[in-house]
Amino acid sequence: MAGYRAVTLRSRLAGAALGLALAAGPAAAQDAAAPQLRLDLTPYLWVAGLSGSLRTPLPDRSGQEVSARFGDVLDNLNAIPLMGAAELRYGRFGVTADILAISVKADLKPVNGPLYAGGDVQLTQVIGSALFSARVLDTGVHTLDLGLGVRAFGLSTKFSLDAGLLPGTSKSPGATWADPLIGLRYHVAIAPRWGATLAADFGATSSTQQTWQLLGTADYQIGESTVLRAGYRHLSFSYGSVPVHQNMHLSGPIVGATFRF
């Protein structure tokens, strides 16, 4: 009888333990799959060519075409550029910030025939964006994020015209503005360490104040927390107001590395 009671007790204890394990199993799995806070920092170098048109309050001119090939940008820099991005992510949701500050100097073509012999323009542009995103697709191979945010601009210029028939002159107009943004980012895993990323966004507040961007990179993971990236980026923006009207395009190769924490 004592042996029977011992077997019964062991059976009950085993059943209770099994019940506790089954009850705790889903909770443990849920804890393991709980979202984690992650920070990605991406310093990058974007060797962007500059093209577009500028309209300023300089006398006797309606506008001026400005261009600098991306191969010459490094020679035209007036200061060390600041370029970088950061993303803070928690589960499906994230916020991404990007900052670009660059100062270049380019020559101006002769203006209005012999009135001015030419000149130069110095552009200091600060562009910052913030995008709040949600992951709407995640298959393990393909991910897609959709986001809403804003891109802000700060422009400082110095235009100088060389004397021709008219005496030389210079102006230093500037402007600040911001555009709301809608954007997406798609990533595909191609091989265990290789992937590709495509990002695009668009924003506008009027027909003369718009911005859009395309970015494509090939990604190579060299460790658990480091991804190397190389690709091409194009950013366009227009702004029409007194005293400056500009329609600018920045395009060129981009290289960087993402460090995950």
Image (cartoon, rainbow, N blue to C red):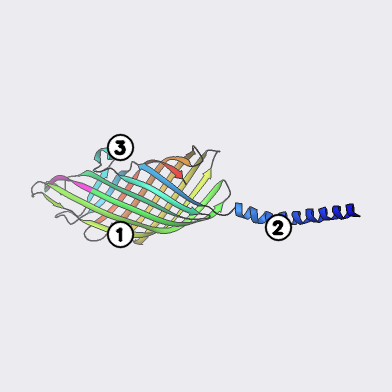
- Alpha carbon of mark 3 to alpha carbon of mark 1: how far? 29 Å
Q: Which residue is mark 2?
A: 23
Secondary structure at numbered mark 1 = strand
Secondary structure at numbered mark 2 = helix
Q: Which dot, 3 or 1, sits closer to the camera?
A: 1
Q: Which residues are magenta?
A: 116-122
Kind of residue indicated by mark 2 = Ala
Relative to residue 215, is residue 187 drawn left or right? Answer: right
- Alpha carbon of mark 3 to alpha carbon of mark 2: how far? 64 Å
Residue 19, image x, y percentages: 75, 57
Residue 71: assigned label: 3
Classify mark 2: residues with Cα within 10 Å, few (<14), some (14-19) or many (20+).
Answer: few
Secondary structure at numbered mark 3 = helix
Residue 124, image x, y percentages: 25, 49
Verify whether residue 118 appears in magenta. yes
Residue 150 sits above or below residue 235 on the image:
below
Considering every residue shown, the one lying at the far right of the view is 1
Residue in the foreground of this view, choosing between 120 and 12: 12
